Image: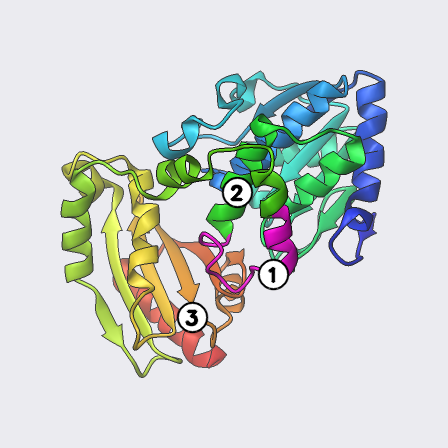
Amino acid sequence: MTVSLPRGTELTDRAAAVLVEAATAHATVVLSGHVQPDADALGSTLALAEGLRRRGARVLATFPDPFVLPASLAWLPGAEGLVPSAAVPGSPDVFVSLDAASPGRLGELAVLLDRAGTSVVLDHHASNPGFGDVRAVDPGAPATVALVADLLDGLGVVLDQRLATCLYAGLAADTGSFRFGNTRPDTHELAARLLATGIDHAEISRRLFDTAPFGWLGLLSVVAGRAVLEPDVGAGLVWTWSSTAEAAEHGLPGEQLEALVDVVRSTQEADVACVLKGQDDGSWSVSLRSRGATDVARVAVALGGGGHRAAAGYTSTADREGTVAALRAGLSTEG
């Protein structure tokens, strides 16, 4: 069943009904965000897991392998209760996918979409093709946590500091601290509700955005120094690259590469910013950001990925030169 109404409680009514029924029956509910979860995926998972527990459901919260959280997210309330994917039942009563733009983003947990009694999909990616039994997918929502907040209201769960911390982390992250174009009037209304619980929003933002090991400065210097500006590609392209191996040389875990694109995107002369992140298996994880003139989700989908108009990504198995060549071609077509 696909619910295709404007964002708000109507969009999540069907999902709420399924989850209320599951909680009343003390059913087993498995929740998962996407592989290598960000603040939105993890905040959504942890907040909904806690809300369902309060309603009486038997809840297991997880995410796909590799089962490792970066330090910037491991402090979120409830993260200590996450279990590896191998520990969840193979046929739960309900499986909930959160912030996954496609089944592939669920890794080894994607099989639960079919094996669960009912599968529920909560997402806000424009590239979501539609999957699961009950779908609350709204590309207009600023973050999946906004849908979860509506769903918690439908469950009759009162927001407190524990829940609000998880939700605010996802909302702040996916709106770029309310700087991105996906920020709307009701985004600030939700933020106000969360702040009213008494959360320390400054501390949340510091942990998410303003804390990094000293080695990050060295890595940033090297990667920014090799950036390439190609103003004639599409509406302008700036790109650079790094790798998990290079991050390790600076004493950093691979997830520190994720923040690079937010520095590169500040280039005035380019509408599209790109960072290629070399993985241990030889593939490239490609992050794209747009200043507004280019729909990078369309480009990413054409190259096997997905995302939003202003933020998207995909994986390439070509070498670095081939990966950039394919991106140039995609941006030229989009332009």
Q: Are marks 3 and 2 in contact (CB under 8 Å)?
A: no
**Label 1's element?**
loop
Q: Which of the two discs, 1 and 2, sits closer to the camera?
A: 1
Residue designated by label 3? 291
Q: Quadrant of residue 197?
A: top right
Residue 237 rendering spot, x and y as whole percentages: 33, 73
Magenta-drawn stretch, dominant element (helix, strand or loop): loop
Q: Position of residue 99 (x, y in %)?
A: 59, 44
Q: Residues within 10 Å of mark 2 (few under 14, many from 20)?
A: many
Contact? badges 1 and 2 (CB < 8 Å): no
- Residue 176 magenta-drawn? yes
* Residue drawn 56% across the image and 44% down it: 104
What amino acid is at disc 3?
A: Arg
Which residue position holds label 1? 184
| Residue sitting nearer the eye, 299 or 211 | 211
Q: Tell me the quarter of the picture where residue 26 sits.
A: top right
Alpha-carbon span between mark 3 and mark 2: 21 Å
| Residue at image coords 53%, 65% | 309
Q: Which residue is mark 2?
A: 170
Q: Which contiguous range is marked in magenta?
A: 175-190
**Residue at 77% across, 58% down:** 6
**Disc 1 versus disc 3: distance between alpha carbons?**
17 Å
Foreground mark, 1 or 3, reads 1
Residue found at x 54% / y 60%: 308
Where residue 262 appears, as percent x and y from the top left, is 34, 56
Type of residue at label 1? Arg
Q: In the visual, does 315 lie left or right of 158? A: left
Q: Is residue 86 above or below residue 209?
A: above
Image-based side of 63 in relation to 274, left or right? right
Q: Earlier in the sequence, mark 1 or mark 3?
A: 1
